[in-house]
Image: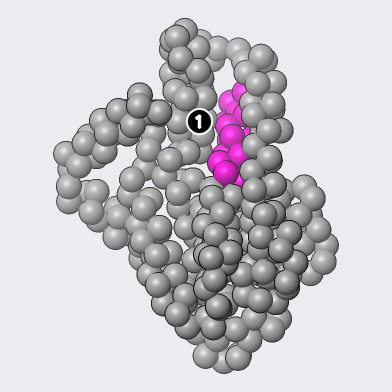
Amino acid sequence: MRLYLKYASIIFRSQMQYKASFIMSLIGQFLTAFTVYLGVYFMFTRFPSVNDFTYTEVLLCFSLMLASFSLAECFVRGFDTFPSIISNGEFDRIMVRPRNEIFQVLATRIEFSRLGRFLQAGFMLAYAIPKSGVAWTPDRILTLIIMIIGGFFVFSGLFIIYASICFFTLEGLEFMNIFTDGAREFGKYPFSIYGDGVLKFLTYVIPLALFQYYPFLYLTGKSDRILYMFLPLIAILFLVPCLLFWRFGLRHYKSTGS
């Protein structure tokens, strides 16, 4: 952890060498998320609720999803840009270094400008928390925290799968964006609004609903099943098959010869 923090410090200082560029990138990420929020806002000016979820409840759901994704995109960006690491031969150097490959890929790129999205999520949370009507008991505060943590690890696992596929294809496959950027977009609403088929897929295959939909029901008082509170922790286990797939791909890696 100490070494990772040192890498993060070096990367942050290097990005701050161009302060104007960094600040504009941060603002750009903030405004990108803000335009999505405007879509939600204008829709609720026409409709009082969506599948029995009110504006503030949807805003709370959206902010939790955006916070999880922005943290993953910031600190696990190395896996999202893994195709370039493969194609330019940089992974050959990673393989001969005396450190774990996952650690090195994580440390190759940390996009602090992505925290602009997290800032937007923070503003939405600050507005939605007092307006949502949720009784913020300690268990619900804990639920909110572990939803963000669980989402961070699930998105991290998806980025690892995306990178692992590159061992076989050399290039990233765009369909994975359905589960990363796509999940961030349609995850602004509780997944139940998309139908039972989608909800089951996002429960048993890609466990996005385990940190978004079910604990959100408990958080907003629409369900009193306390088990829902701990489902984001179960979702973290999604990392296990992701890391196994990474190890499988690593065993089949062949240098590009760059």
Residue at image location 56% in from the left, 54% down from the top: 146
Residue 85 percent across, percent down from the top left = 46, 25
Q: Magenta stretch: residue 158 in it?
A: yes
Query: Of 86 and 231, which appears nearest the observer?
Result: 231
Q: Nearer the viewer, residue 222 or 252?
A: 222
Res 107 quadrant in image: top left
**In the figure, residue 142 lies in which quadrant?**
bottom right
Q: Which residue is depicted at the point 62% across and 18% down? A: 250
x and y percent of residue 241 in the render? 71, 33
Q: Is residue 4 left or right of residue 49?
A: left
**Residue of label 1:** 82
Vertical position of residue 141 compared to residue 103: above or below: below
Span of residues in magenta: 153-175
Quadrant in which the N terminus appears: top left
**Image position, residue 179 (x, y; %):** 64, 50
Tag 1 secondary structure: helix
Q: Is residue 79 above or below residue 20?
A: above
The amino acid type of the residue labelled 1 equals Phe
Dot 1: few (<14), some (14–19), or many (≥20) neighbours within 10 Å? many
Q: Is residue 251 magenta?
A: no
Confirm whether residue 230 shows in the render.
yes
